[in-house]
Amino acid sequence: MKYVDEFRNGDLARGIAARIAAEVQPGRRYSFMEFCGGHTHALSRYGITELLPDGVRMIHGPGCPVCVLPIGRIDLAIGLALERGAIVCTYGDTMRVPASQGLSLIKAKARGGDIRMVYSAADALKIAAANPTREVVFLAIGFETTTPPTALAIRAAKAQGLANFSVLACHVLTPSAITHILESAEVREFGSVPIDGFVGPAHVSIVIGSAPYEHFAEEYRKPVVIAGFEPLDVMQAILMLVRQVNEGRAEVENQFTRAVTREGNLAAQKLVAEVFELRSSFEWRGLGEVPYSALQIRPAYAQFDAERRFGLAYRPVADHKNCECGAILRGVKRPADCKLFGTVCTPESPMGSCMVSNEGACAAHYAYGRFRDVAVVVPA
Amino acid sequence: MKKDYQRPIDFKTGRIDMNHGAGGRAAAQLIEELFARAFDNHYLRQGNDGAALPAPAELLEGGRLVMACDGHVVSPIFFPGGDLGALAVHGTVNDVAMLGARPLYLSASFIIEEGYPLADLQRVVQSMAAASREAGVPVVTGDTKVVEKGKGDGVFIATTGVGVLPRGRDIGGANARPGDVVLLSGSIGDHGVAVLSKRESLEFETTIESDSAALHGLVAAMLAAAPEGSVHVLRDPTRGGLATTLNEIARQSGVGIRLEEAAIPVKPQVDAACELLGLDPLYVANEGKLVAMVAPEAAEAVLAAMRAHPLGAEAARIGSVVADEHRFVQMATRFGGQRVVDWLSGEQLPRIC
Amino acid sequence: MVERLDGDQALVDLAGVRKPVSLALVPDAAVGDYVIVHVGHAIGRLDAAEAERTLALFGELAGGEPAAAPAIPA
């Protein structure tokens, strides 16, 4: 697979790992946060953590859009299916997120809700066209990568004059997530969990470009290296971060030069701006209300906004009191620190969203990293 | 009017209706013109609701009977490299074979949805009959029911297989021991990708076909290649893929398994398709592959026997069984790291982020 | 990308496997270009020259020679 396999080369990986180990300053600890689902996945699937020296720790940030989706939003979607008889379409992972009253979309489906998994917003459009007498609602989640496809779908719905299609918009913005973490009490507090740098998301950066991160580097004096989603990309980015920290720099560097430019994908940005506008505030699971962090549909496309169409009122719902998703999403606690991890909360019966998506910190740790919690001898 | 004239069933344009399941003349005609004709054997010709079967030699010599059953609900019913009918035969023959038993007979129960095209039903049944003949395992008894439109997905097939084990043979998921070698009979992911690709409108240069196959011949060759008792575990990684099967065995046997990713055969197109669909081949279903855990001193011989058989040409040694109270299945990645290969949670869902 | 189809659709090819995706977000992609695909859409083009440069850099880093940080059009 061209431009795929080469970026997964094991020999090169060992070489870069050796480089990182050589350049890490002895006795110094480095903590880097990545908040791109693709990166969490790459770290797990390829076992990159094993190749990093002990002093380098990777923290999973809130880069999993399913994980930051608050219970209240899922409740709205379930309500649309069970009480309003709408066909609710969503991406696969969203179906398992636990919501109120022990329900989730998949459980609501078992109770008779017409809830369908789709691979893209366009699929939801097709369902709407095929079922003209039913209301079809697309539960749209995701960061800046999945937002353009949703915008396309809404624009297409308008062009096709579809009268039964709407979107429950839960799209969130990456820079706001980062700011919120940097502003959070634990991180600011010296001696708590310092984050030395960020691995910038791959796909999101293709869309928004590298410019939006310059603000963090300047204002908070934290280096950002935008990395591609293949394992060698991630390793190179870690090396670049180590170098920045060692040299006392705080810049935005682009490792993913083959796909990311400073401006990003202007066509996609323009499309999004046409259909969406900023929400003044939005609840993120685990982070609470975050200002200017999410999008809502513009008045010009109001008929496609499920919240307006169905007169939905948002009610926030608190997580299980022992669920540490919030702290884990902010990078201040690890999955193993949560009392519920691995016992009450497992991938089969997730209590919080970090366990649901396989890019959630807890699910990734459960699936791929749990063995590190116990002393397992790997034969040479 | 000719006596006893019955208009033959219109297989070209006809559809199943409630009469076909009512047990009356229409039902009898369907059985005669479709099922009995396709599966035709001595037992079915008796025309009874059950089959009286002779005791096989191994049983008389102190062996044991083996029984296995399966429900087949695959959708779409026809896919590259196979269909529901062939799958039904292969699946149950394989379940019997995975115990190290010789498969002898099959039963087949059809639950058909009102309105299902007879042309398709005929195609499925004829394919099933062909698979049965090729495997040398006859369908000796069966049943047909029709459910109302909307209450069945076209057609479901449930099969039961009967086989026999020679005296003393005990192969099962709880028998893996630290030190055993893990062997895999060929490339993984073919079936799942073949089925999914249709749905996802993937096109292939060379079509990926389901690997659906009856494995009892391969198993017999493997067992013959080494002293009795060398092969401890046999299992076919169907739903949930290789990862699920290995986790099941690890749990049953109370052991850990260590794999080498580089040793696991995956066809390049299956790899690419999984990449495009956001899937991990380790969790994708196979219908013509098996995994074996074999005593280390016998591993070479068994592997050679596998490679000599058409269904095991790409057989490989993919890892070993270790002592591990946590029963982890762990893999050394091609990339150089380590990862745990865990159970599948729910359906495998393509990643969106 | 190997072929343009109707409307916004195009066929992309990965190791001989082809899939239709939407080009609506990368309207100026041409046959022969490499694109990055996500949820059924091409979201950006892959600059082959930069890809080669990155690969070369990996090689240098892995080879143990002091390498300068990559050119940063950040």
Image: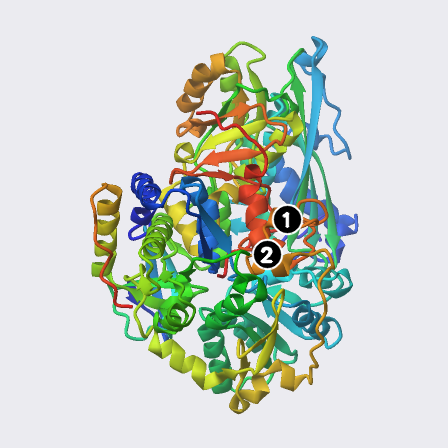
Circle 2 sits on which residue? A328
x, y (%) of residue A307?
64, 82
- Return the residue nearer the eye: B210 or A9: A9
| Nearer to the camera, B319 or A43 | A43
- Coordinates of residue A209 in the picture (x, y in percent): 35, 71
Q: How is the image coloured?
A: rainbow
- Mark 2, other Cα within 10 Å: few <14 / some 14–19 / many ≥20: many
Amino acid type, label 2: Ile
Determine whether, in the image, residue A295 is placed left or right of residue A5.
Answer: right
Residue A257 makes an appearance in the image: yes
Q: Chain of mark 2?
A: A
Q: Kindly identify which chain the residue marked by label 1 belongs to.
A: A
Residue B136 drawn at (x, y percent) = 56, 27
Question: Residue A184 at x, y = what percent?
Answer: 56, 67
Question: Relative to A245, is A55 above or below?
Answer: above
Q: Label 1 near label 2: C-beta < 8 Å?
A: yes
SS at mark 1 in the image:
helix
- Going by the numbered disc 1, the residue's amino acid type is Asp
Figure check: A302 above or below A147: below
- Closest to the observer, B255 or A51: A51
How many neighbours does mark 1 have within 10 angstroms: few (below 14), some (14-19), or many (20 or more)?
Answer: few
Disc nearer the start of the sequence (2/1): 2
Q: Residue at x 74, y 71 (%)?
A: A82
Label for residue C74? none
Quadrant, the C terminus of chain A: top left
Q: Residue furthest front?
A: A190
Q: Is residue B73 visible?
A: no
Is A92 on the left-hand or right-hand side of A228? right
C14 sits left or right of B84 in the view? left
Location of mark 1 (residue): A337
Q: Quadrant of residue A38?
A: bottom left
Judging depth in this view, the residue of B125 and B204 nearest the camera is B204
